[in-house]
């Protein structure tokens, strides 16, 4: 098992992607439990063996990644962004069948689910609470635009809460449709 290469044109390479050590995710992380499942694979709660820090490990089946160019673009963008309101990608590993993405753990769920929960309970977000969330999302978008990145999929499902508390910071996710613009570019579908 090796990490992906940093050159986004080489999708499933055999060189290092984020850091310089070879090996498997299992050399560095202990799987605690499965915390989610989706179309492309599963998500696990993992613990970094030396620091005890918890992170999320997305295990993606390579055969489910239909558009490898789009996937490489997403990885390329995620390795460039570093902002407190954007979910951090730490490392990527791969083996013959899977790609493993080690990411910042966001325990608080989606903004969409919180909005629905508020509606169901009859306790809507106050203007101040909504403004706090909106401000954080706008900080993330502004940062992306400063980096010449257009997210192109801003929606409540792509905003996660770091923790389960009401005052938790939010994190922008899912850069699968994002584009990097160059001087004079017009971003099209």
Image (tube, rainbow, N blue to C red):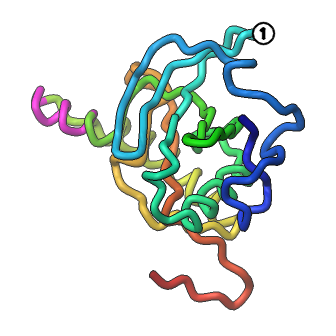
Tag 1's secondary structure? loop
Q: Residues within 10 Å of mark 1 (few under 14, many from 20)?
A: few
Task: Pick out the residue farthest to the front.
Answer: 96
Q: Residue at x 74, y 85 (%)?
A: 183
Q: Residue at x 70, y 36 (%)?
A: 90
User: Magenta part mainly helix, strand or loop?
Assistant: helix
Left or right of residue 77, residue 112 in this image? left
Q: Which residues are magenta?
A: 114-122
- As rendered, which of 79 and 3 lies closer to the eye? 3
Q: Position of residue 184 (x, y in %)?
A: 69, 91
Q: Position of residue 134 (x, y in %)?
A: 43, 48
- As rendered, which of 123 and 102 lies closer to the eye? 102
- Quarter of the figure with the C terminus: bottom left
Q: Position of residue 168 (x, y in %)?
A: 47, 26
- Residue 117 location, quadrant: top left
Left or right of residue 117, residue 135 in this image? right
- Residue 127 location, quadrant: top left
Q: Residue at x 40, y 20 (%)?
A: 164
- As rendered, which of 186 and 10 lies closer to the eye? 10
User: Vertical placement of 68 versus 97: above or below?
Assistant: below
Q: Residue at x 67, y 59 (%)?
A: 11
């Amino acid at each position: 098992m090796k990490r992906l290469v940093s050159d986004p044109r080489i999708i499933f390479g055999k060189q290092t992607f984020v850091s310089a050590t070879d090996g498997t995710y299992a050399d560095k992380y202990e799987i605690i439990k499965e915390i989610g499942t989706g179309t492309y694979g599963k998500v696990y709660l993992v613990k970094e063996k030396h620091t005890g820090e918890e992170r999320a490990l997305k295990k993606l089946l390579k055969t489910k990644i239909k558009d490898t160019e789009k996937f490489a673009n997403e990885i390329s963008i995620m390795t460039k962004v570093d902002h407190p309101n954007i979910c951090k990608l730490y490392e990527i590993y791969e083996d013959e069948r899977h790609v493993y993405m080690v990411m910042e753990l966001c325990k608080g769920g989606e903004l969409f689910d919180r909005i629905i929960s508020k509606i169901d309970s009859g306790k809507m977000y106050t203007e101040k609470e909504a403004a706090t969330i909106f401000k954080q999302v706008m900080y993330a978008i502004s940062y992306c635009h400063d980096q010449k990145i257009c997210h192109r999929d801003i929606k409540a499902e792509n905003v996660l809460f770091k923790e389960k508390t009401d005052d938790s910071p939010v994190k922008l996710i899912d850069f699968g449709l994002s584009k990097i613009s160059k001087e004079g570019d017009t971003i099209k579908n």
